[in-house]
Image (cartoon, grey):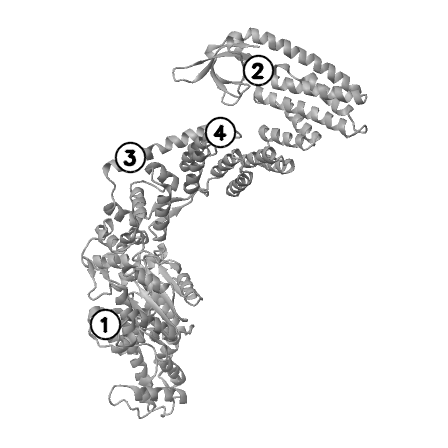
Amino acid sequence: MSSYQRVALFIFFDSIEKDLVTHIRSLAGLVTTGFLSAQERDKAAQRAEKSDEPGTVAKDDFELLYQLDLGDKIAIAQRLKQHFGDGFRKHFSAKAASLQAAVPVRNSVMHGRPLTVEEHATAFALANDLVKSNGFWPVLHKALVDYNTDPEAITRRAVSFLEHPSEGGIFHNLPLPDYDDTGFVPRPQLEQELKKKILSRHPVVTVLGDGGNGKTALTVQALYSLVNSGDHDFDAIVWVSAKSSKLTVGEIQRIEHAITTSMGLFEEVVGIFEEDKSNPMSRVRQLLENNKILLAIDNLETVLDDTIRDFVSDIPGQSKVVLTSRIPVGGDLTVEVKPLTDNEGEIYLRALIKSYSIKTLSSLRQDELRYFASRLERRPLLLKWFCMGVIAGLPASKIVSNPEMALRFCLENVFDALSPDATMTLSLMSILPRAVSLGVLHYVSSTDIRKLEAGVAELLKFSILETENQSGYELNYRIKPFARAYVARILRLTAEAQEAVIRKFRGLSFAYQAERGAEGQEKYNFRNFTVRSISEALAAGKLREAVKLAYNDEFEAANAIIDTLKVSNHDYFEVFRTDAFIRFRQHDFAGATDAYRSALELSPETPQLYFFFGGFLLRGYGDCPAAIAQFEEALKRDPESTDVKRELARAKMFDYDFEGAMKILSLEMTKPLSNMRTKLIFADLQTQNFQRMITHKSAVGIDADLEAPCLAFADFLVTLDPRIVDSKMTEHLRKARSSIVQALHIRSVRAGARVVALLDKLIGELEASRDDTTDHCASASGLLGTLKEKGRKPNFGFLVDRSNREYFVARAMVSDLVWEGLEGGKIASFEVELDNQGRPRATNVHLI
């Protein structure tokens, strides 16, 4: 049934045409019959012959005027305006453009086509403007007075042909839209997208969205647009609705005789064309195969079953199907209809208030309008329901404070279709206060990660969840605010289950801060992980466990952890970095390479990834050039890292770029390195580099220069601090001595003898010192260390031994002289004891 606003607009335009005809007929004494063009006369005569009204056979052009459209009448008045009196001629000239602009609106009104909010406004504005000169538009003036006195009384007027399709168009049974009272809020991008997909090659298009978002309105508008434009080649557009309920002010009202089964839906389609409804699905398929039909099925979710799914999976012929549904069918093209924007919601709410003359809302400010619209999520259906409630006498604030019935209406049928996995996931999320990742869900529930993944995927498909990715590297999920209120009422965990989940959730912050605290310590240590979120902090703890398992060759358990994290934290690069390490331990070098590349794709600016990848290429494949390239990429991103420079020098040394390695090592050893272990590693690498350089140059022939490397080695040995040398480096010094002695047997090298002498002296001192130190430190557990710079405080610090283990040392437990020596980088011997919490600390600290 047409709304009273549409009937009013019909009467307004009809009145305008009657007044215009009256003005033209008033020229009967001045203009002779024959003023119509041949085309206008034929058009009017044909319509007069088809008219059902008695006595409509026209005798002259003045009588034929009634059979013409508003556009024709305006054109005729323009041709005859010189014959009008001065007053009307000037008035008509001033209003002709407005009248002409309203012709498309008039045509939509007369032929029952949907109107937009702007078209509504244009028509009402024209009527109100014309009657300001009421002497010229008496019929329109009376119609407006009647309308303003009693708007709804106008529906008692008989306007029977409003719902007839336009002349000359294809067959369609599109319904009159239910937004007649206000007009359609234009959503041009969605309309264009829907029409484009309907006209594409794909046979099925689903207009998908939550209840009340305006799916049906958008689809009706788009289909009417296709009918009117003729921009298609369908033989017919067939509409069938499976809508089973409607929202009223006081209840959700079930629609009598609504289609409730898929077979009922097919019977409805067949009944549009023929009386025999036997075997309806086969007959529908035959209709679609023999004709090019666009079949529109509204509210599909009420009858969605396997029969419908089978039907839409194989649409016969060149026909197509467009669906509106709250639930995706699967495999179809979709157009997602979301709630109105803030601006659209305000426009629609104002149109409703004006259309229904709601005085209590007419003076609302913009912020107040947007508040009410926002509380109802700017859903067109709920905005209209809100206005109906206010008209019924309910306070506006009360309606929006608890719209339980509206929630139930918009979400019914959807929750009934959820799988157990989706229901369980939704129950969990309903008690959490904010958006969470899959990893957090897994942690707080201990539910199988694949069940959670399946549940989240289904809830996203049903538009119950929304995503949040503020950090740019982790996807979080939350229940849409509109659905949360409904979920909380129908899906409840037991009190015990809720408490268990919330207890774990409370511990998330502590886990995150603990990982963040450890992150800054030795970022190039393989057991340390970069964490940027709570979810990654949880994953880091599991990764550390996986590394430990891999070191113990428990690969099955380690891989099980990685497989789980690839689901819960698929975008966390440390998962793939650890996966690469485990694969390396299993000698799966190809898999390790792929894992490192995956990690780099996820976080290409993280220097540690290039560092560890380079180390793998160097140690796994012995591919020095590739390793050097990775270390250089790491150095670009962390140019001050001694760890990266150390490994780059090592790779260059193995690649026979001894000068390149020496350049890096020499430069770094002039700087104040952080601790004794770092100084030792660089000195040891420099020793190995000299030894390999001299051996290589000695082997390539007599032309190779051995003087320069021997001189450089001698300079290095003169400046070397013997206190940092350990037994392993001593062996490398002995190996270097042997290489030089062998080279001297082949050829004379002046600097070579000096290097041998320096090495003999140093090795002798080291052996004597080691004997003395062993005696001196026998009671000190044989531990030597230096004070670590990072983390040092005025009243405490950490001693680091040669194995890079750390021991707490309190300022108050050593003398001022010892503390000053430690701060100056001196080596100390010490014993170790455990405090009351089982943590190691240094005692009996003495400078060496």
SS at circle 3: helix
Q: Earlier in the sequence, mark 4 or mark 3?
A: 3
Say which amino acid is labelled 3.
Answer: Ala
Q: CA distance from mark 2 to mark 4?
A: 37 Å
SS at circle 1: helix
Q: Earlier in the sequence, mark 2 or mark 4?
A: 4
Q: Earlier in the sequence, mark 4 or mark 1?
A: 1
Q: Is residue 135 above or below residue 789?
A: below
Quadrant in which the N terminus appears: bottom left
Look at discs 2 and 1 and give the one toward the viewer.
2
Look at discs 4 and 1 and give the one toward the viewer.
4
Q: CA distance from mark 4 to mark 1?
A: 91 Å
At which x and y percent is residue 727? 61, 16
Query: To which residue does mark 3 refer?
Result: 500
At which x and y percent is residue 110? 31, 76
Query: To which residue does mark 4 refer?
Result: 551
Q: CA distance from mark 3 to mark 1?
A: 68 Å
Residue ID at (30%, 50%): 419
Query: To which residue does mark 1 refer?
Result: 145
Say which amino acid is labelled 1.
Answer: Val
Say which amino acid is labelled 2.
Answer: Gly
SS at circle 2: loop
Query: To which residue does mark 2 refer?
Result: 824
Of 379 and 413, nearer the camera is: 413
Pointers 4 and 1 in contact (CB under 8 A)?
A: no
Q: Earlier in the sequence, mark 2 or mark 1?
A: 1
Q: Is residue 718 above or below residue 43?
A: above
Quadrant in which the C terminus appears: top right
